[in-house]
């Protein structure tokens, strides 16, 4: 099923000059980029995004970290995009993330794990709405769609 999901390259990914290489992984997989921007999240935006984690011991540090510098937000679309993006990112704890995943290749610490991706259809919808206005998402066809998507996708 065609899905859309929200991905963030967190401030550590930007500071470590990994934006291009990380974007390439989603792009080369075939996910279609519908929205893309670099911004510095303020506290209100970070708290909305991480509302589900409020009250957890790592929450304060999480908000501090995600607001500590610019990040890259992207909206992508594709078959099973939610699961595909999370698999591309790898496990939350980098020690458990397999080689070949973004976290498995570039991260060591859970608090500096480089990327975020929505975890379910409902969170993808609400997180996309937090980070992108509807007019910031661009719908378009790609010539390669014929090669990477089934006819009924
Ligand atoms: P996810 O990013 O893989 O969906 P979540 O459980 O939703 O993982 O946690 C959100 C983020 O909070 C993680 O990506 C990670 O950066 C941070 N985090 C999760 N658990 C811990 C922890 O135990 N200590 C510090 N940071 C954590
Ligand atoms: Mg999560």
Image (cartoon, rainbow, N blue to C red):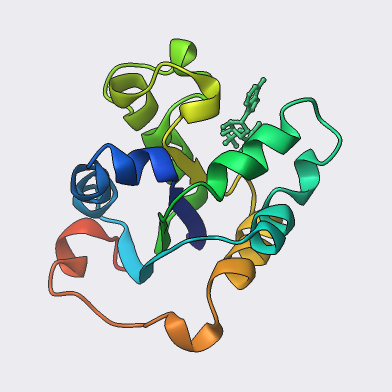
- Residue 152 in view here: no
Image position of 44 with respect to 83: above or below = below
* Residue found at the far right of this picture: 55
- Residue 59 position in % (x across, y down): 74, 35
Q: Relative to the observer, which residue lies in front, 103 or 76?
A: 103
Residue displayed at 66% across by 33% down: 61
Q: Quadrant of residue 65?
A: top right
- Residue 117 in view here: yes
Q: Relative to the observer, which residue lies in front, 10 or 29?
A: 10
* Residue found at the far top of this picture: 95
- Residue 30 position in % (x across, y down): 25, 55
Residue displayed at 70% across by 48% down: 50
Horizontal relation, residue 114 to residue 25: left or right: right
Count of numbered circles on the image: 0
Q: Quadrant of residue 55?
A: top right
Q: Relative to the observer, which residue lies in front, 73 or 45?
A: 45
């Amino acid at each position: 099923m065609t899905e859309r999901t929200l991905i963030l390259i967190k401030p550590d990914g930007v500071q470590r000059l990994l934006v291009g290489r990380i974007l390439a992984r989603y792009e080369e997989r075939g996910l279609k980029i519908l929205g893309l921007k670099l911004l510095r999240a303020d506290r209100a935006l970070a708290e909305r995004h991480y509302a589900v984690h409020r009250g957890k011991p790592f929450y304060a540090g999480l908000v501090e970290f995600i607001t500590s510098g610019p990040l890259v937000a992207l909206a992508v679309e594709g078959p099973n995009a939610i699961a595909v993006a999370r698999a591309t990112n790898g496990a939350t704890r980098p020690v458990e993330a397999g080689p070949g995943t973004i976290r498995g290749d570039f991260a060591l610490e859970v608090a500096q794990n480089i990327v975020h991706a929505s975890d379910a259809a409902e969170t993808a919808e609400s997180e996309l709405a937090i980070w992108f206005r509807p007019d910031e998402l661009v719908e378009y066809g790609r010539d390669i769609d014929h090669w990477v998507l089934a006819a009924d996708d």
